[in-house]
Amino acid sequence: MSQLHKFIFDGLPVRGMLVQLTDTWTEILRRRAANTEHGAYPAPLLDMLGQMTAAATLMQSNIKFDGSLTMQIMGDGPVKLAVVEVQPDLSLRATATLIGVLPEAASLSHMVNAHNQGRCAITLDPKTKFPGQQPYQGVVPLFDDHGQPIERLSEVLEHYMLQSEQLDTTLVLAADVGMAAGLLIQRLPVQGVGNLAGSMVSRENEEAIGRNEDYQRIAMLAKTLKSEELLTLDADTILRRLFWEESITRFEPLQGANGPRFACSCSRERVARMIVSLGADEAHSVIEERGELEVACEFCGVQYRFDPVDTAQLFVEPTRQAAPGSSAH
Ligand SMILES: [Zn+2]
């Protein structure tokens, strides 16, 4: 069963989280494999999307925020887009768009940063918004301060956390066909350094924030965790092996209905709204050509079909609806 474990290092300004997505992740893969148009993810893309899924779950769980967290990589290589969306209750979905074929051992930059134009965006969309409020979005490039492509997703996200949350974070991420997993170690916010979303931190500042012996020691221990260990050992064993010299307090793991799990938020109504936004001409020309409108959800694979009658109704509906408050009672 998919699990998320939270823990703190007693008396130190450091906290941690470990996620192991099993059934949640295999459900995402199963639905993709069942998609006759795209087929299963090739290994390097599966690895990248799995790491994103684990990381987005950790990040959603790490912030106190009542809204969805969406992690997107907009690629300039064969992988055009990879998206993970995690709700505050840790239900999540993920998908990726691949054009063409990937070599067996494609690197991160080969997939999404072929021309150094790839970007990673994190969007926080509050559940309840005041009028005109936009979701908050932070974007980081997939290259380092010297313009060199970054080959590890964990490094891209560590950079994001430092830049937009001003939090020192260490991530270890891994995925295979059976699991997507991640370990997050974070230094608790420094007093006086606010969480000014989107604000830039100077390099001197980054170093000042990074100067903390306890955090550095624990981060270094975390970095010794190998992908294979993260994907095969249970949480107890991992934490004991890594931090046996540290005193940690663990919390009740989040699992089942309280833990990470697959769920898609698509609906026929949403698809209908999307069709309406395309316009009547576009919709009717597809109907003329194919006899019906068929839209498949990229996340869960559910097919939504609109025959000519359904489609016609989409465009007359608003005028036939009763005005608000004019119910028969
Ligand atoms: Zn769906």
Image (cartoon, grey):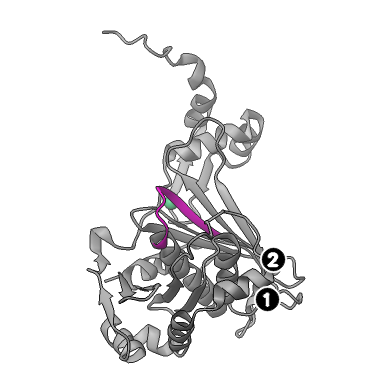
- Tell me the kind of residue under disc 2: Gly
Residue 199 location, x and y as percent? 63, 56
- Would residue 221 be visible to someone looking at this image? yes
Q: Gap in Å between the C-alphas at discs 2 and 1? A: 8 Å
The one of 25 and 213 positioned closer to us in this rendering = 213
- Was residue 157 drawn as part of the magenta stretch in this picture? no
Res 118 label: 2
Residue 138 location, x and y as percent? 60, 56
Q: Quadrant of the N terminus?
A: bottom left
The one of 248 and 23 positioned closer to us in this rendering = 248
Residue identified by numbered label 1: 109
- Would residue 33 be visible to someone looking at this image? no
- Tell me the kind of residue under disc 1: Ser
Residue 86 location, x and y as percent? 43, 57
Q: Which residues are magenta?
A: 62-71
Q: Is mark 1 within 8 Å of ligand 1?
A: no
Lateral position of residue 173 relative to residue 329, left or right: right
User: Measuring 40% from the left and 58% from the top, which residue is drawn there?
Assistant: 92
User: Measuring 29% from the left and 62% from the top, which residue is drawn there?
Assistant: 259
> CB of mark 2 within 8 Å of CB of mark 1?
yes
